[in-house]
Image (spheres, rainbow, N blue to C red):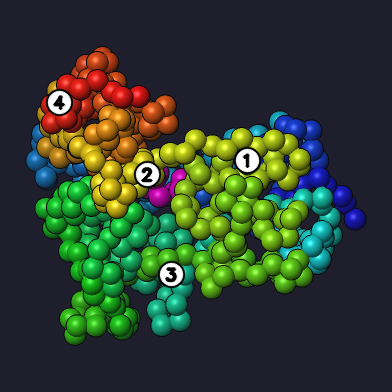
Amino acid sequence: MDQFDLLVVGSGPAGRRGAIQAAKLGKKVLVVEQGKRVGGVSVHTGTIPSKTLRETALNLSGWRERGFYGRAYRVKQEISAEDLRRRLLITLDHEVEVLEHQFARNRVQHIRGKASFVDPQTMQIVKDDGEVVTVSAASILLAVGTKPFRPDYMPFDSRTVLDSDELLDIQDLPRSMVVIGAGVIGIEYATIFSALDTQVTLIDPKSTMLDFIDKEIVEDFIYQLRDRNMKLLLGQKAEKVERQNGKVELTLDNGRRLTTDMVLFAAGRMGATDTLNLAAAGLEADARGRLNVNPETFATKVPHIFAAGDVVGFPSLASTSMEQGRIAARVAVGAIAKEPPKYFPYGIYAVPEISTCGLSEEEVKERHIPYECGIARFRETSRGHIMGLDTGLLKMIFSLKTRRLLGVHIVGEGATELVHIGQAVLNLKGTVEYFVENTFNYPTLAEAYKIAGLDAWNRMGDIKSEI
């Protein structure tokens, strides 16, 4: 039986970052991946594919240029599912090649197969060819990610009723689509297909969406979706879904009926822990298959077993999963693990993008902090005019007492890139004066920071910071 310092189950963002971190500390590391290739959900069905699909859709459809040339403008008149898939495969091949090189360069061993616990120190790996390998490790990191939630009442057929993993393999682009679930995944795919001129209807039992995002940003986002004729049926539930004559019929709880070419069910994900035999290790998952961990060390209740990434729940971001994996690996091998900065950015790759960092206006109110906001619209910037943007909003929230930045929230083109300026100022405890006094490249969308900073400064008055 092989003995390792760290055994990592899963090669997604948390698993690969944890494995490489431990290897750089001179430890003997094994990564087990049950997929056909390394990379996990992030590379093969989640983060990278959905963002590649988004970029391909915007490029081929001419979406970004329609502000100048009209809504009928197209780069490619007839866009097929094969057009989308071609770019996706090139991107995935590159991601896998980079990851395999990183493993080889850092001498991380990896094996394909399904791992399950024999006891708290030992795991059994069933390889694709049926061979069974047993390994033990001083520490174990579970980074198995998630899989789509598939309720029994939904008639999945991988063609007209699909989950978010199956959507990547469709043969034809639908003329109409119903997306069930107004969470991040549902919204991203709904807006991507809307940009491809598919008639999209979004359904969710909740009357609101994206409740963790600043309400003003969500309102602007919803306005943009409705302006391009997306139907939002919030506060309504699909009680019955049936396939009939190549179409899908849905009956909602209010009696309304919908007919569509395709249904995407994107109402939640489950931790992929059901095959791990957690009981043998003294662990158990919650109803959604997730594992409870110490938020500082990512250790489970069994001290030498750690978990990181989507399997531990919110925020379920590739970026935060990487940091969780790195911290867990350092703790697992006895190295000092420095706590990451307080504020991290959250990105939603919808069309348009949304990104946020720090406190929302609702959170500031709940904490009874006296505050002021500054707002800039992308159309106020010269770069916005050059790009043909008539939408896009950047909002910053400042403390009236300390004048420090409390939160930055953006909806519009490039939001997930722009947010990092605000993130840096947040973590460095900067004030409104930073945005007023500093020079930004011209013309850029980053100028919106100066416009929003001046907007807030004018409302706050020229009072020097108390810091």
Question: Distance of mark 3 from mark 1, alpha carbons?
Answer: 36 Å
Instruction: Give residue 72's position: percent from left, percent from top.
Output: 11, 45
Quadrant of the image occupied by residue 13: top right
In the picture, the quarter occupied by the C terminus is top left
The residue carrying mark 2 is 347
Q: Which mark is residue 326?
A: 1
| Above/below status of 458 relative to 2 | above
Whether pointer 3 and pointer 2 mark residues with C-beta atoms closer than 8 Å, the reply is no
- Kind of residue at disc 3: Ser
Identify which residue is drawn at 28% across, 43% down.
369
Q: Which residue is mark 3?
A: 158
Residue 461, numbered label: 4
Disc 2 marks a residue whose amino acid type is Gly
What x and y, as percent, mark residue 168? Answer: 42, 57
Q: CA distance from mark 1 to mark 4?
A: 44 Å
Residues in magenta, as a range: 47-55
